Amino acid sequence: HCRRGPSVAFIVDKLIISLLPLARCTLDVCAWQLGMSRRTLQERLAERGQEFSALLATRRSQLAVDYLGIRNFRPGANCPMALLPRGV
């Protein structure tokens, strides 16, 4: 049995978490942190059916929900504007 390490998508997700607060979360920075070119990182993610932009968007959404303390968040359904009476 060959034991595999964490997937590239998993590692990139962890990088995204650490880089987002620093406003340094780009494909280029993540690739540099992993010691590979931008293209190689894109290819490795694509092999797993992933894209950097999708991973970044998902993590941003999850962090926003966590920061706001929203439970059972559903896009559109939990919008604070939806709680206001119509015409306000």
Image (cartoon, helix red, strand yellow):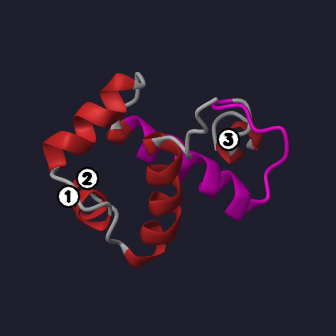
Residue 79, which numbered label?
A: 3
The quarter holding residue 41 reads top left
Q: At x 76% / y 38%, what residue is drawn?
A: 73
Which x, y percent locates residue 57? 45, 43
Q: Secondary structure at mark 3?
A: loop
**Of the residues under marks 1 and 3, which one precedes in the sequence?**
1
Q: Is residue 79 left or right of residue 53?
A: right
Specify start and end residues of the magenta stretch as a single range. 54-76
State the CA–CA distance, disc 3 to disc 2. 30 Å
Do the residues under discs 1 and 2 have CB atoms within 8 angstroms? yes
Question: Amino acid type of disc 1?
Answer: Asp
Which x, y percent locates residue 50? 40, 29
Q: At x 77% / y 41%, what residue is drawn?
A: 83
Q: Residue furthest bottom?
A: 22
Quadrant in which the C terminus appears: top right
Query: Which residue lies under the disc numbered 2?
Result: 27
Quadrant in which the N terminus appears: top right
> Foreground mark, 1 or 3?
1
Query: Which residue lies under the disc numbered 1?
Result: 28
Question: Amino acid type of disc 2?
Answer: Leu
Do the residues under discs 3 and 2 have CB atoms within 8 angstroms? no
Magenta highlight on residue 58: yes
